[in-house]
Image (tube, rainbow, N blue to C red):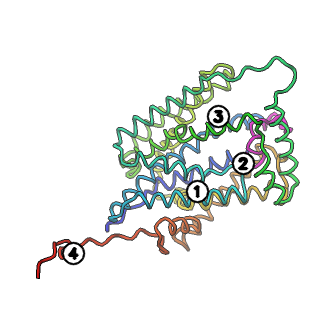
Amino acid sequence: MEQRKRAGLVDAARGLCLLGILLANMLIFQYGIWGKDDMQFYSLSAFDSSVRTLLGIVVEHSFMPIFTFLFGYGMIKMKESLEAAGRKPGWTLCRRFFFLIVIGLIHAELLTESDILTFYGFVGFFLLMFMNRKPKTLLIWGTALLLVVGLMGLVPEETASPSPHKSEKDIYQENYIKETIVVYGTGTYSEIKHHRLTASPLSQEDPMFIFILMFLAPFLTAPMFLFGMYSAKKDCFQKPQEEQRTYARSALILLPAGFCLKVLPYLFPGPGWAATGEMIGANLLALGYLFSFAWVYSKQMGSPWMKRFQAVGKLSLTNYLMQTLVCTTIFYGYGLGWFGKIGVAAGCGLALALYALQLFASEWYLRLFSSGPVEKLLRICTYLSFQGKVRARAPRSRTETAPSQPL
């Protein structure tokens, strides 16, 4: 079987993506998944408030879509590799998605409230219906769903009640955030785990809304998955030096367009059309980042830094889980107990330091081993092989395929 060459640009882009995800997740590690959007409970300096706004514009919701894009891309490339080996991809991909869900559930059970692996596993099953569609079909569906997602920003929010009393929803969330600050900052591992798995900021009416949102989630996030699948089928990002102009043109259009749309809610916090701009702009900015990095990669192929980004990307699952382990130990009470204490800017500095460590540690690790421990485990479960590799089906000989002759 002819071995398909792994795309170094895709690995490097996945590695860069982990930096953006870490910067965004650092807010959750520091302030909680609900507290990060309600910073009135923390004593932020003017500088930290400005950094928080900057993160909201240039980082939040614009790096996870890159990971989403690359997930769809990788799904198609894995399908092609399986077919080249004479294997049907359906059941193999299903096993991969199932074990991704298992890893995500363990991650969420033991460490964090911000797991994405479980969601990606479930969405993988949803994407199977698009796996054999033509590139044009994927592009049309992705564009249409992106517009639908954007138009959801026009749905009017509940008008604020003129009553001076807080709503039941506000009281639930306020009490939850206050309790989280105490438990996460000073609690033991068992106390924090119990709070994470049992406490809820939702009022009794909210669970139905959450259920509907979970049902719609695959459709809301589908555009970037589908764009990634489209790019894989068109063999994009396989020949960076030949595609430099495409990267440059795309970046010059998508970066300013995405930024201008994403900044609208900060300039015009009232109108619904501003929220629509933000939803669409977040994805356009993500694509702008991806094409910008692709252009830089095409100019610096083979450089030590690009090799380090590739190493982080090859170990993306292991590095993602390690980020959670290190950061929860730093911020939660059973570790250093820095929850809500060091500030947004210092948190960004910590994220950059941790990522720099991963850049060098990943490169060193891959000199000794061919894949990360979690990646290896996932591949073993996916391919049902201790080598973690797809086994090519031997072609049947003529004698095997010829009809039996009468005696």
Q: Which mark is residue 400?
A: 4
Q: Does residue 336 appear in the picture of this structure?
A: no
Q: The residue under label 1 is which amino acid type?
A: Ile
Residue that carries the numbered disc 1 in the rendered image: 101
Query: Which stretch appears magenta?
Result: 28-48
Residue density around tag 3, few if under 14, some if 14–19, many if 20 or more, within 10 Å:
many
The residue located at (83%, 46%) in the rendering is: 180
Q: Gap in Å between the C-alphas at discs 3 and 4?
A: 62 Å
Secondary structure of residue under mark 1? helix
User: Mark 4 against mark 2, which lies toward the viewer?
Assistant: 4
Instruction: State the residue in front, 249 or 406.
Output: 406
Q: Is residue 310 left or right of residue 180?
A: left
Secondary structure of residue under mark 4? helix
Residue 215: % across, % down: 57, 40
Residue density around tag 1, few if under 14, some if 14–19, many if 20 or more, within 10 Å:
many
User: Mark 1 against mark 2, which lies toward the viewer?
Assistant: 1
- Residue 36 falls inside the magenta stretch: yes
Residue density around tag 4, few if under 14, some if 14–19, many if 20 or more, within 10 Å:
few
The tag earlier along the polypeptide, 3 or 1, is 3
For the C terminus, the image quarter is bottom left
Residue density around tag 2, few if under 14, some if 14–19, many if 20 or more, within 10 Å:
many
User: Mark 3 against mark 4, which lies toward the viewer?
Assistant: 4
The tag earlier along the polypeptide, 3 or 4, is 3
| Vertical placement of residue 226 versus 352, above or below | above
Residue 232: % across, % down: 40, 49
Residue 49: % across, % down: 78, 35
Q: The residue under label 3 is which amino acid type?
A: Ile
- Residue 21 falls inside the magenta stretch: no
Residue that carries the numbered disc 2 in the rendered image: 26
